[in-house]
Amino acid sequence: MRVLILNGSPRRKGTVATLLKSISDGVSQKHEVEWIDVCNLKMKPCIACMKCRPDSECAQPGSRSLRR
């Protein structure tokens, strides 16, 4: 099983990160774990251009919002 951990806290060594680290340590012995610090992602808001509807591709350069 694959486990995805999304850390939404901007504090890398804060309470939330510490809790998630404990969870990660507990499940990583039996499962594959991927850790993502959401605060490090460069996300842009949708500009509602609707280019993604027919093309399945975002018009904004570098956007990974439609990753499949």
Image (cartoon, rainbow, N blue to C red):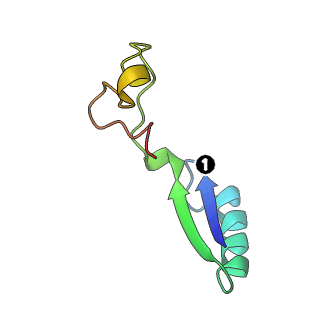
Residue extending farthest top: 49
Q: Which residue appears farthest toward the bottom when viewing the image?
A: 29
Local packing at callout 1 (Cα closer than 10 Å; few below 14, some 14-19, many 20+) is: some
Please tell me whether residue 46 is drawn above or below residue 31 in the rendered image: above
Q: Which residue sits at x=61%, y=61%?
A: 4
Q: Quadrant of the N terminus?
A: bottom right
Q: Which residue lies furthest to the front in this view?
A: 54
Q: Position of residue 15 (x, y in %)?
A: 70, 59
Residue at 31 percent of width and 27 percent of height: 60
- Most foreground residue, 42 or 32: 32
> Which sits in the foreground, 59 or 15?
59
Query: In this picture, is 1 found above or below 35?
Result: below
* Relative to 13, 27 lies left or right: right
Is residue 1 rendered to the left or right of residue 57?
right
Q: Report x, y in % for residue 22.
A: 71, 73
Q: Residue furthest left?
A: 61
Task: Left or right? Give the position of 4 relative to 26.
Answer: left
Number of numbered discs overlaid on the protein picture? 1
In the image shown, does 27 or 13 lie closer to the viewer? 27
| Residue at image coords 62%, 60% | 5
In the rendered image, residue 20, in percent from the top left (x then y), is placed at 68, 64
Question: The residue tagged with tag 1: helix, strand or loop?
Answer: loop
Q: Is residue 21 left or right of residue 64?
A: right
Q: Quadrant of residue 31?
A: bottom right
* Amino acid identity at mark 1: Ser
Compared with 20, 10 (above or below) is above
Q: Residue 37: image x %, image y %?
A: 52, 54
Q: Which residue is drawn at 60% across and 54% down?
A: 7
Q: Mark 1 points at which residue?
A: 9
Quarter of the rendering containing residue 51: top left
